[in-house]
Image: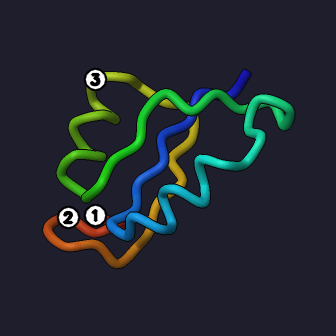
Amino acid sequence: MVRMIIADDEPMMRKGLQTLEWREMGFEVIGIAENGLQAYEMIAALQPDLILTDIRMPGLNGIS
């Protein structure tokens, strides 16, 4: 199972991504971040295999 974090500042996008059947595709969502700083902290703490991120977020963007 690939451990994944979702990071997006848009509530509708986060909600939509959460509705996908990730487990059926071999992914486990271990965290959902609302901004770049929160995602950065989750990455450090949870050590995901994959990060699905928006590249345009306030604060730290998805590329930083």
The residue carrying mark 3 is 45
SS for callout 1: loop
Near-viewer residue (11 or 23): 11
Check the picture and name the quadrant holding the N terminus: top right
Specify the amino acid type for callout 3. Answer: Ala
Residue 64, disc: 1
Near-viewer residue (19 or 8): 19
Q: Could you say where residue 62 lies in the image, as x and y percent from the top left?
A: 36, 65
Please tell me whether residue 48 is drawn above or below residue 62 in the rendered image: above
Specify the amino acid type for callout 2. Answer: Leu
Q: CA distance from mark 2 to mark 3?
A: 17 Å
* Mark 2 in CB contact with mark 1 (< 8 angstroms): yes
Specify the amino acid type for callout 1. Answer: Ser
Residue furthest bottom in the image = 56
Near-viewer residue (14 or 31): 14
Q: CA distance from mark 2 to mark 1?
A: 6 Å
SS for callout 3: helix
Residue for point 84% across, 37% down:
25
* Mark 2 in CB contact with mark 3 (< 8 angstroms): no
Q: Is residue 30 left or right of residue 21?
A: left
The residue carrying mark 2 is 60
Quarter assignment of residue 52: bottom right
Check the picture and name the quadrant holding the C terminus: bottom left
Q: Could you say where residue 4 lies in the image, as x and y percent from the top left?
A: 56, 36
Q: Earlier in the sequence, mark 3 or mark 1?
A: 3
Quarter assignment of residue 3: top right
